[in-house]
């Protein structure tokens, strides 16, 4: 059975109800012809992306992230012997920590390919001799952009303000409404 590395974004898309790439990513992951590998940091990345980026409530995001422990997915522990190369790659290639660790995992376990929707990671894989794969087609990518524009706050301050508003709303709905008004409907810092 061929081995493949799996990035958190493919998992996240597969776990989001109604996301344009959900079906394609879920089908890709459930493809029984492959044995998928990821790092022990991936469940954390999945949890934080679901909750902080996509607004999935904490209990549901935690449940979905923990479901990875029961999935047909091999979770590889991060080893201290891989940290030097991974951190160096973060610095030279501009990669996130887990992305660099995924490359290191593929290299050390001789995993020939890695699936991701992160173009920077896929380019770095190719440079390292790891076959890059993305199960998301261009038509899905265009639908994703439309979906994310309508479902997610703009990146930067609006996205941050949306998170703050949500957090305040869980604790004090009246204060949340004042914050909404003071921030110009989450467009600027009050």
Image (cartoon, rainbow, N blue to C red):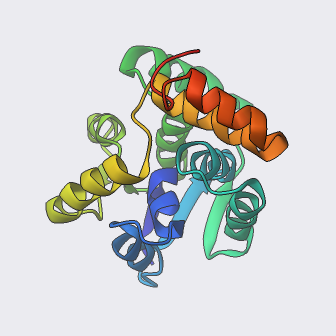
Image quarter where the C terminus lies is top right
> In the image, is 176 to the left or to the right of 159?
right
Tell how many labels.
0
Would residue 153 be seen by someone viewing this image from the given angle?
yes
> In the image, is 46 to the left or to the right of 121?
right
- From the viewer's side, name the closer residue of 171 and 32: 171
Who's the residue at 45% across and 25% down the image? 187
Q: Is residue 119 above or below residue 22?
A: above
Residue at the right extreme of this rendering? 171
Would residue 110 be seen by someone viewing this image from the given angle?
no
- From the viewer's side, name the closer residue of 181 and 66: 181
Who's the residue at 49% across and 71% down the image? 17
Q: Position of residue 47 (x, y in %)?
A: 67, 51
Q: Is residue 142 above or below residue 158?
A: below
Q: Is residue 182 above or below residue 125?
A: above
Q: Quadrant of residue 115?
A: bottom left
Who's the residue at 73% across and 42% down the image? 169
Image quarter where the N terminus lies is bottom left
Residue at the left extreme of this rendering? 139
> In the image, is 77 to the left or to the right of 151?
right
Who's the residue at 70% across and 56% down the image? 57
Q: Position of residue 50 (x, y in %)?
A: 59, 53
Q: Position of residue 6 (x, y in %)?
A: 48, 57
Q: Position of residue 76 (x, y in %)?
A: 67, 53
């Amino acid at each position: 059975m061929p081995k493949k590395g799996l990035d958190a974004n493919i998992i996240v898309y597969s776990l989001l109800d109604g996301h344009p790439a959900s079906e394609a990513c879920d089908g890709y992951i459930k493809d029984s012809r492959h044995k998928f590998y990821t790092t022990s940091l991936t469940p954390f990345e999945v949890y934080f992306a679901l909750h902080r980026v996509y607004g999935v409530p904490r209990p549901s995001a935690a449940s979905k992230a923990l479901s990875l422990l029961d999935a047909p997915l091999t979770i590889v522990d991060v080893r201290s012997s891989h940290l030097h190369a991974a951190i160096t790659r973060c610095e030279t290639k501009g990669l996130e920590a887990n992305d660099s660790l995924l490359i290191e995992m593929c290299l050390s376990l001789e995993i020939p390919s890695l699936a991701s929707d992160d173009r920077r990671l896929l380019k770095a894989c190719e440079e390292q001799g790891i076959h890059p794969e993305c199960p998301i087609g261009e038509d899905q990518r265009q639908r994703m952009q439309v979906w994310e524009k309508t479902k997610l706050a703009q990146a930067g301050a609006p996205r941050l303000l949306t998170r703050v508003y949500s957090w305040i709303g869980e604790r004090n709905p009246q204060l949340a409404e004042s914050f909404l008004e003071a921030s110009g409907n989450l467009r600027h810092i009050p």
